[in-house]
Amino acid sequence: MGNPKPADQTHDYVRIFDTTLRDGEQSPGATMNVDEKLAIARQLERLNVDVIEAGFAASSPGDFESVQRVAQTVTEPIVLSLARTREADVDQALRSVEKARRPGIHIFIATSEIHMRHKLNMTREDVLEAATWAVARAKQHLDYIEFSAEDASRSEWSYLAMVCAEVIRAGAQVINLPDTTGHAIPEEFGRMFAYMREHVPDADRVIWSAHCHNDLGLAVANSLAAVQNGARQIECTINGIGERAGNTSLEEVVMAMRTRRDLMGVESRVNTRQIYPASRLLAQIIGQPVPPNKPIVGDNAFAHEAGIHQDGVLKYKLTYEIMQPEDIGIPSNKLVMGKHSGRHAFVNRLAELGIDTGAIDVNKAFADFKALCDKKKIVYDDDILALVQEETRHSAEWFELADLRVTSASGAAPQAEVTMRVRGEPRSARATGDGVVDASYKAILKIAGIAPVLERYSVKSITGGTDALGEVSCLVRSDGMTVAGQGAHSDIVMASALALVNALNRLKLREGRTTELARS
């Protein structure tokens, strides 16, 4: 197995460890299939992140395959799998990355009293022995080993320093101190890193890493405090997705270091012009729209409505803008092409938008583009991105929407007639409802044979105008599992149906993973 060289300690920069595909996917409704994970991994490589945590290989055969495929797909970032301090976990993680150009493993165990006593039922000595054993075992096969002391922010510092010293001696290259519960505040979290770097032998031989959760809204602030106290890796996710309130937001922490380099004195090597495309891609894949007021990538991040602000920006942008939209790759929404554009120009435009043309049916996408040109006066970049993403949602799915017909008249209940392919077999159903969307949903669920709870339904216009593509997001829950779905179409009823079908397919994916995990 090939091994990456130890990280360059002479060039002072903050490494970006992206865990969108592992910790991020644990966010309710954020389940991704293998092809979707590969699309995110390719975009992470375009972002120039240093490390991709591709999953938790031992958790299920599906996760093992995802890690393995990502490891074989990207070439520049280090690709690693998470692993507990168990023989089966470590060996499965090693196998999942063995074909990676730059393989790694991420081993973790909790070090706080509350976790050791109530979750692990282990003593301090047990935890120390398990941590060093797992790192030493992994060291027999590869060099790039990261060790995480779960719940570090609530651990006793002297004991934490002892654990860190021993795993460094066993061969760990990166020491990660997570704020697992989002409990820390910046001054406290920063002091923990300063203490470890002062009290752990050979602390200068390893990269110190911060992994923060956002339960108190302090994940970015805590990560920056860690950097100011010597951390040189930040673990984060696109759009800040993750368990509970989420993880450190990649776009926020990267742009904070870049914008305030005068104070931080260091920044990442991320290609910031790929930030906005990454944010949009993830939002479309998991069906979770970016809030308008989300820093950096929200629709309102560069909007100015107050008259004084507008006047100032028109006179000199820096009066109210501390960064430029172009810096993060926000498109100009200019007219891309029209109905007379050829296939070659269309393919070139897809490549410019960061779309892997080898992963989609270009002929089908071009036909859909032509059809859209006949419906819309103006076709924007965002329209094309939505079209292509809608196309990728329907590849190798359990349910596929084949036809939808709705009728509505004053004085009569709206009706819907739906035809779907279930594993390739066509099935049809009719239903009435409070509206055409409600009727469509009832007909779809008749065919699917399940009755999930619709927890959220939202509609968004992708671009302006009455002929704009509509983007619908929904969140459904069934048997304790919550998934999101998304659909885009010039007909909002069709977009709504596509969103529900997408969610049902995600439910099937989650059900399959749960079954695999129970068998393993």
Image (cartoon, rainbow, N blue to C red):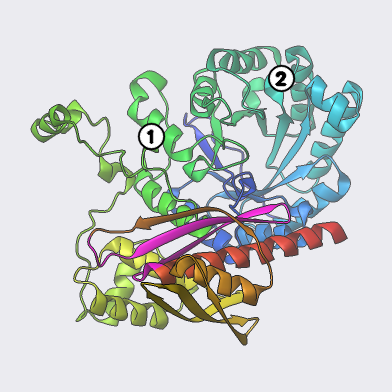
Q: Amino acid at mark 1?
A: Met
Label 2: which residue? 154
Q: Are marks 1 and 2 in contact (CB under 8 Å)?
A: no
Q: Quadrant of residue 175?
A: top right
> Residue 27, position in %: x, y?
61, 46
Which residue sits at x=30%, y=49%? 330
Q: Quadrant of the C terminus?
A: bottom right
Q: Looking at the picture, does residue 75 appear above or below residue 255?
A: below
Which residue: 91% across, 23% down?
123
> Under tag 1, what secondary structure?
helix
| Side (left or right) of 280 relative to 379 | right
> Residue sitting at 29 percent across and 62 percent down?
381
Q: 102 or 17, which is in the foreground?
A: 17
Where in the figure is residue 87, as x and y percent of width and height? 87, 46
Q: Is residue 413 above or below residue 270?
A: below
Whether 105 is drawn above or below 336: the answer is above
Q: From the viewer's perspective, is residue 182 above or below residue 391?
A: above
Say which residue label 1 marks: 255
The x, y position of residue 167, in whole percent, is 77, 29
Judged from this view, the residue extending furthest toward the bottom is: 426
Please say whether residue 230 is one of the residues in the magenta stretch.
Answer: no
Q: Amino acid at mark 2?
A: Arg
Check residue 477 for magenta coloring.
yes
Please state if 115 lies on the left or on the right of 455 as rendered.
right
The numbered mark at residue 4 is none
Q: Which residues are magenta?
A: 465-492
Identify which residue is drawn at 56% across, 25% down.
216
